[in-house]
Image (cartoon, helix red, strand yellow):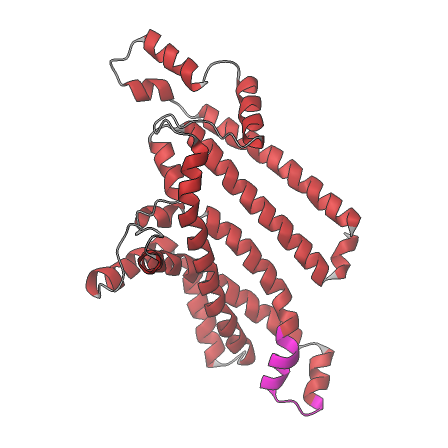
Amino acid sequence: MTRYLLFRALSLSLSLVVASIAIFAVIEVIPGDPAAFMLGLNATEEAIANLRTELGLGGGMVQRYLAWVSGMLTGDFGTSYNYRVPVAELIADRVWVSVPLALMALVLSTLIAVPVGVLAAANRGRWGDFLTMTTTQLGIAVPNFWFAMFLVLLFAVQRQWFPSGGFAGWDTPGAALRSLTLPAVALALPQAAILARVMRSALIETLDQDYIRTARAKGLSPRQAILRHALRNALIPVLTIIGLQFSFLLAGAIIIENVFYLPGLGRLIFQGITQRDLVVVESVTMLLVFAVIVVTFLVDIAYAIADPRLRRT
């Protein structure tokens, strides 16, 4: 187990290094000068040069990269070019929107997917299974922003049950949860479709095992065999997908946050791109990559605990 953990930790570290280099390189090759963008068309070369120095845009690329990485390791993500406040403060304000949104979407997708996958596996080869697989395939194919616009039209514009956008703040928890409900559903539906198919496949594979046949031979009904024996073992790969989905939901909510005008990390990245606030884009993107890699690492450890065979790899 120790060797497995060391190998995964080394893989985590290398992934973070490669990701940081890739993110920094992509931001560096983007055309345009943030200082010139901030000062406008009538700015003089001297003023632009002074602002570049103030923003820390001078020096070589390697020097700027090392300064950026060392700052993040100490909790200093830099200062926003446009907001003129530390990026860490912007992240701290926005994370209380993105993380609850991802958690709500994850819970919703799990509550939808697990029973749907179980029903499909229990009725494999029948019309219920066919309809379930067709519906989940449609859920995977349709983009989540289409679901978002449909939900706004139906439940915000016509029914007026939920707000169409914005965030009420956690001072009023009920209103805050209502603000996140439609975005969470829009995020959850495609993920629920994927998870339901994984649940169905894992359960069908488990139902074909010898111990399930033995349980049926001893008199258990198909429902009892699924609930008492098959479901528990089929949940192992499903739990792995659930852990990975949280990472995706946290990092992949940029479009949904912009559709609903939520002040989350995804919208912060979008605003940073449009405003040429490169330090915000770099830092927030790296933070999301770090969250994805860490969650993946924790999922690998949990999977190794559940399945000792993986510890030998």
Q: Main secondary structure of the magenta part?
A: helix
Using residue 242 as the reference point, say whether residue 179 is left or right of it.
left
In the depicted structure, whether residue 100 falls above or below residue 138: above
Q: Position of residue 114 (x, y in %)?
A: 52, 70
Let me know if residue 169 appears in the view: yes
Q: Position of residue 279 (x, y in %)?
A: 44, 28
Using residue 46 as the reference point, say whether residue 115 is left or right of it.
right
Magenta stretch encompasses residue 290: no
Residue that appears at 48% across and 33% down: 283
Q: Residue furthest left?
A: 158
Residue that appears at 64% across and 81% down: 228
- Image quadrant assignment for residue 291: top right
Q: Residue furthest bottom?
A: 219
Q: Residue furthest front?
A: 171
Q: Nearer the viewer, residue 161 or 275?
A: 161
The stretch of residues the image draws in magenta is 217-231
Q: Position of residue 170 (x, y in %)?
A: 36, 52
In the depicted structure, whether residue 307 falls above or below residue 120: above
In the depicted structure, whether residue 171 falls above or below residue 236: above
Q: Position of residue 247 (x, y in %)?
A: 52, 50
Residue that appears at 79% across and 54% down: 312
